Amino acid sequence: MNSKLKSAVWLVVGLLIGASGAAAAATSSGERAVAYTKVRKAPPYEGFFTDPDTGFRVWRLGGSQQEMGSRLPYPDGNEALGILHGQHFYSKTSPVNRDETLVLGSGGQNQPYAALWSLKQHRLLAWVPGPQQEAHVQQRQLLWDRHDPLVYWFTEGDQLMRARIEPRTFKVRVARWDRFPEYRYVTFGYGEGNFSDDGRRIVLMGPDQKSGFTFMQPYEVEQKKVLPRRQLTSETQPEVDWAGVDPTGRYILFDQSVPVRRTVVVSFAKAATDVPMVIYEHAKHSDFVVDRQGEAWIVYGNWQGLFASRLSDGTDRKVWPVDNGGNVPFSVSGHVARVAGQAGMVLVSRNVDGGLYLVDIDEPARVRYVGNSRQGRKPEQARDPDAVWGVDTEGEVTFYKREPRGAVSRSGKYVFFTGDYQVYLPSGYDPEPEWCRAYLNMIEVE
């Protein structure tokens, strides 16, 4: 990519990405980057196109039942393939292994195998095993090991499983690591959990074997040490959405629904008894980040912008846009994903326009636009009462399997998203087919 184009995609806050892909100055009222891009069809399966706005290559890894099944037949028969097999799991779960050579997909709905792609070859290598019988939809989540690039983890029933990939044959050896008989089943924080950066700590969640109420289980992996657990749901606290340990391993975040929806923090070491401190008064798509001083934060977006809350004391500040011109709306509702190898850096995927941005909470005046997920419709299209399938009146995605769920590799060199490429198709927007052309894509960020 030439130097002029490369420098253009580093956006000082206050730039607009127009429909033509050119940058223009923003007004003082606080308008910010909006990433409506040129018409693009999906890249060919296991092929790429060059994004005209950035010069970056965009590869399509996921494909249809026919495309993926033809490349490598599914172990249970190609008729068992579903749309989730062609996608990654979630924004907080990086699909890339430690040395950035392999990409791991989502487990299918009640199907025991997930896709394994070569990052460099951009092709499907194998179908690797996950839980044989799902007790909960979030047991589709597979987590890469923090240290070994050939090891991944998953939960199956009330067990924590460790899987190792043979590097030449891609065959997988699965062994039970531990079992939690007090639970009917366990998950990685109901689909939003992860390991601490040293790989030693994680938080499991699941219903109690007897009462059925949800508990969170702090767990030290190497020592197989089960710490005292904390009850999260009860007759007066009927639901919980997620729980997770931060990258430093010092804190656990979880949400509460009563008296209001809010996100709270406790210490990992005293999770069972610690008095929760409120971090923010709602629950949003978010991810952890560690700043340049080693402080842990949770970063989230809403209709006003992107915010960060410090876990040690609850300090909350706006990150992007820096100056929003008062109360001018600027929605950053969407997903947030940590760039683990860069202090303070997150990937933001905005639902409202499909824009994908790298944002540094330590230097929020610089925002890098890296592409567009090309899902849903532009707001003016969404307002058409005859053409609103899949989006709301603001153009945001309403069907989860179409959401971009932007994720990123440890180095930040590879950005992943789910995109259906039906943004500008004149033939209409299919409401909710199982194979909805919403596939896993990868951007090579230069």
Image (tube, rainbow, N blue to C red):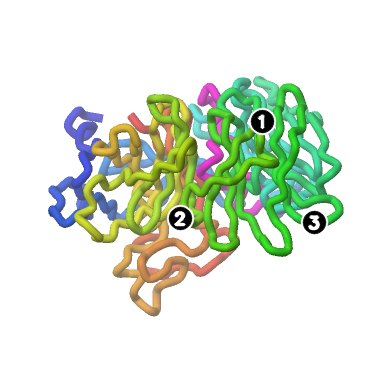
On the image, numbered disc 1 is attached to which residue?
Answer: 152
- Please give the label number shown on residue 74: none
From this viewpoint, which residue is outermost toward the bottom? Answer: 385
Labels 3 and 2: the sequence-earlier one:
3
Which quarter shows the C terminus?
A: top left
Mark 2 belongs to which amino acid? Asp
Q: Is residue 73 visible?
A: no
Residue occupying image coordinates x 47% and y 33%: 296
354 w.r.t. 224: above or below: below
Mark 3 belongs to which amino acid? Gly
**Dominant secondary structure of the residues highlighted in magenta in the image:** loop
Q: Residues within 10 Å of mark 3 (few under 14, many from 20)?
A: few
On the image, numbered disc 2 is attached to which residue?
Answer: 420
> Residue 274's x, y, as percent?
63, 41
Mark 1 belongs to which amino acid? Tyr
Magenta extent = 81-110
Look at discs 3 and 2 and give the one toward the viewer.
Answer: 3
Contact, CB < 8 Å: mark 2 with mark 1?
A: no
Please state if 288 lies on the left or on the right of 145 as rendered.
left
> Residue 404's x, y, as percent?
46, 51
> Residue 84's x, y, as percent?
60, 51
Question: 353 or 126, which is in the foreground?
Answer: 353
**Quarter holding residue 331:** bottom left
**Quarter holding residue 299:** top left
On the image, numbered disc 3 is attached to which residue?
Answer: 212
- The kind of secondary structure element at disc 2 is loop
